[in-house]
Image (cartoon, helix red, strand yellow):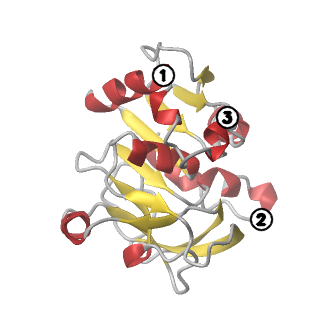
């Protein structure tokens, strides 16, 4: 399964994802500069974390206009897989590939921590490697990670089983319904604020995140 990692000016987690997919899991992986327009050989597109375009104006708002994003949208519409992590989640909402928006954290502070997550549904290609009763720990690092959507959208997400991860216990950023990660209705696109790639190597003392990638493979 070939992974393509999109790199925008300001991305800073692209090499972390490459390390997981290429070095830990042995999958063909290439980085794709945002001005490229060729995804024909890629099975999975990953939009990593960081500060695309310095998060100027609004997180992900400028990145959605990069040339590669037209191809990402086409890739997704073909039913192929797209994963957005942290800033990548923000880009996916700005591009209209996932519903809702990520806004400033409740207390207006940048948060860098490890948080417990509830795996809400394990019937998706992304979460089938987890148990429904599982609580996992993943790092977060964001200033605009508060998930927000109108009541009708929230109701649809919950009814359709599109909420895949929820903050367990303390809600670190004020996300509605404690949402930490969602998928689209077709379940081929996922966006999440926590960083699974930062908890994938046993050498770090926590490999809860590796199961997301293993589930897909």
User: In the shown orientation, is residue 161 left or right of residue 211?
Assistant: left
**Mark 1 Cα-neighbour bin, 10 Å: few <14, some 14–19, many ≥20:** many
Residue nearest the viewer, comparing 114 with 173: 173
Up-down: is 185 above or below 66? Answer: below
Residue nearest the viewer, comparing 157 with 188: 157
Mark drawn on residue 68: 1
Mark 1 or 2: the one toward you: 1
Mark 2 or 3: the one toward you: 3
Residue nearest the viewer, comparing 133 with 91: 91
**Mark 3 Cα-neighbour bin, 10 Å: few <14, some 14–19, many ≥20:** many
User: In the shown orientation, is residue 43 left or right of residue 62?
Assistant: left
The CA distance from mark 1 to mark 2 is 35 Å
Residue 31 visible in the displayed image: yes
User: In the shown orientation, is residue 160 left or right of residue 180?
Assistant: left
Provide the secondary structure element on which disc 3 rests.
helix
Q: Which residue is mark 3?
A: 18
Provide the secondary structure element on which disc 2 rests.
loop
**Is label 2 in contact with label 3 (beta carbons under 8 Å)?**
no
User: At x 27% / y 67%, what residue is drawn?
Assistant: 150
Up-down: is 141 above or below 125? Answer: below
The CA distance from mark 2 to mark 3 is 19 Å
Q: Which residue is mark 2?
A: 205
Mark 1 vs mark 2: which is more N-terminal?
1
**Mark 2 Cα-neighbour bin, 10 Å: few <14, some 14–19, many ≥20:** few
The CA distance from mark 3 to mark 1 is 18 Å
Mark 3 or 1: the one toward you: 1
Mark 3 vs mark 1: which is more N-terminal?
3
Mark 2 vs mark 3: which is more N-terminal?
3
Provide the secondary structure element on which disc 1 rests.
helix
């Amino acid at each position: 399964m070939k992974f393509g990692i999109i790199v925008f000016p300001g991305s800073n987690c692209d090499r972390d994802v490459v390390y997981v997919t290429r070095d830990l899991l042995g999958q063909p992986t290439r980085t794709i500069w945002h001005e490229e327009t060729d995804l024909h050989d890629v099975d999975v597109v990953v939009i990593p974390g960081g500060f695309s375009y310095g998060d100027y104006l609004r997180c992900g708002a400028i990145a959605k206009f990069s040339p590669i994003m037209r191809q990402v949208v086409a890739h997704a519409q073909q039913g192929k897989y797209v994963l957005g992590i942290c800033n990548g989640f923000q880009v996916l909402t700005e591009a209209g590939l996932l519903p809702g928006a990520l806004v400033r954290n409740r207390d207006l502070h940048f948060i860098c921590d490890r948080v417990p997550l509830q795996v809400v549904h394990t019937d998706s290609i992304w979460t089938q490697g987890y148990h429904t009763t599982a609580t996992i720990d993943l790092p977060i690092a964001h200033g605009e990670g508060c998930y927000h959507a109108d009541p009708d959208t929230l109701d649809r997400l919950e009814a359709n089983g599109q909420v895949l991860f929820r903050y367990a216990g303390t809600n670190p950023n004020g996300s509605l319904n404690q949402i930490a990660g969602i998928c689209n209705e077709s379940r081929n696109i996922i966006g999440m604020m926590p960083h699974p790639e930062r908890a994938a190597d046993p050498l770090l003392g926590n490999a809860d995140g590796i199961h997301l990638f293993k589930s897909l493979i």
